[in-house]
Amino acid sequence: MNFDPLFNPFQIDTLTSKPSAISRLRRLLGLDRAVILTVLARGWSSLAGLVTIVLIAHSLTGAEQGYYYTFGSLVALQMVFELGFSFVILQMASHECAHLSISKDDEVTGDRVAHARLASVLQKSVRWYSITAFLMPCILIPAGLHFFASNSHSGPEVAWRLPWWSVVLVASVAFQIDPVFSFLEGCGYVPQVARTRLWQALLGSVLAWAAMLTRHGLFAPAMMIAGQVLAGSIWLYTRRQLLLPLFFYHAGQDRIHWWQEVWPFQWRIAVSWLCGYFIFQLFNPILFAYWGPIAAGQMGMSLNISNALMAVSIAWVNTKAAPFGAMIARKEYLKLDHVFFRTLAQSLVVCVLGSAVVWSGVIYLNIEKSHFAHRVLGPLPFGMLLLTMIFNHIVISEAIYLRAHKQEKFLPISVMGALFMLFSSYALGKRFGAVGMITGYLGVTTFVGLGLGTFTFLRYRRIWHAE
């Protein structure tokens, strides 16, 4: 992909003169512009998450905390509608942009066929998400109403109905604009998208905190998403000179033929993402149903901390997804492997060190018998959760690498993992609570995710690059 010299989003390293000490440190840590902005956004989200956790502990009861986190798990059912489309959009756009130039004024030039195919990616994406964004609240709202009404527990009544309506409706709006961000990342606007994510995190956090400080804590998820929608929409408006011409571009016979070219790849991604729900999102609803909202709240807050750490550390790899696709399109396999393995090592160091700090904090809170210690899992299950997160970090990185080839080879692993997790989460969670659930999670991740996943990664990397 050839960009204007003032704007080169896919550039990984450019060293034309003797680097300074700061430049060498940035290179060692893999801190290019996209990574820095993404880490800032996710770092802020993590820091803001800590503030949010403190506010939850002080402004919500234990039962309300359970509703708060279970809202998130049920809203995550949007995976059913998303079908892994966002990652497919990113990869399709990056492969077409490898043959195009985008000026700093957002003008697209280059190969006519690639231009038409890029436009058709955007057009089909917007149409699909518009339909599903309408269907999403029609299904999620009644499903949530039924779940919470059927699993009410003794204790003070929680006013959850209006907050539930609010979070689903706002999430549907956010769902509508998400594919455009994936498309722009695929077009090389990785640093710009990362900067926008930072503004989304800032505004969303402020609005969520305002809801909690005014004693409307269960509205905080809806307010956070609303802030993200507002900040995201403002930035997308500034990119209208790129997006609108592409959206109305007549692709004709050069358009992407989705069923022949994309669907054979996408359906595998879709199944993998649906399996991801059973692997990552079933904990809170199961604990809510069998152990009550307080147990679900402890698990939810612990998962939130773990996921925040994962979000920061995986940024090193995520921001390279579009460049990976461009390198593969140009068959630069040696460069691809060099960048990937270096990036994986850098991100893994961040993940392990962060986990050590978090686990030490949990142990300290329990030694001090802090009130906050009762809002999260104990040291043993929390430590097991963090170890599982580290293993997942490796598996997700391997999946990003393989999917950049527009191939989905993790499908059997995802299905197997989902089936084992569905069984273990229900059987162990129902009988032993959070400890049993986390034990099953660690076992499945170790043997199915890390074991079979790494075998699959090494196998197909060798086969594809030998061709």
Image: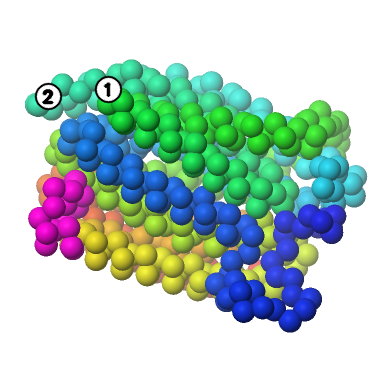
In the image, 431: left or right of 347? Answer: left
Label 1 vs label 2: CA separation? 12 Å
On the image, numbered disc 1 is attached to which residue?
160
In the image, 82: left or right of 10? Answer: left
Q: Which residues are magenta?
A: 363-378
Using the rendered view, name the quadrant where residue 116 is placed. Answer: top right
Assess disc 2: are there few (<14), some (14-19) or many (≥20) residues with their C-alpha within 10 Å of its C-alpha.
few
Position of residue 64 relative to residue 320, above or below, is above
Residue 364 lies in magenta, yes or no?
yes
Residue 161 visible in the displayed image: yes
Image spot of residue 256 (x, y percent) = 76, 41
Q: Quadrant of the C terminus?
A: bottom right
Dot 1: what SS? loop
Image spot of residue 113 (x, y percent) = 87, 45
On the image, numbered disc 2 is attached to which residue?
156
**Prevailing secondary structure class for the magenta stretch in the rendered image:** helix
Position of residue 213 relative to residue 45, above or below, is above
In the image, 422: left or right of 264? Answer: left
Q: Nearer the viewer, residue 347 or 280?
A: 347
Image spot of residue 7 (x, y percent) = 78, 55
Q: Name the residue rendered at 81%, 28% in the picture.
A: 248
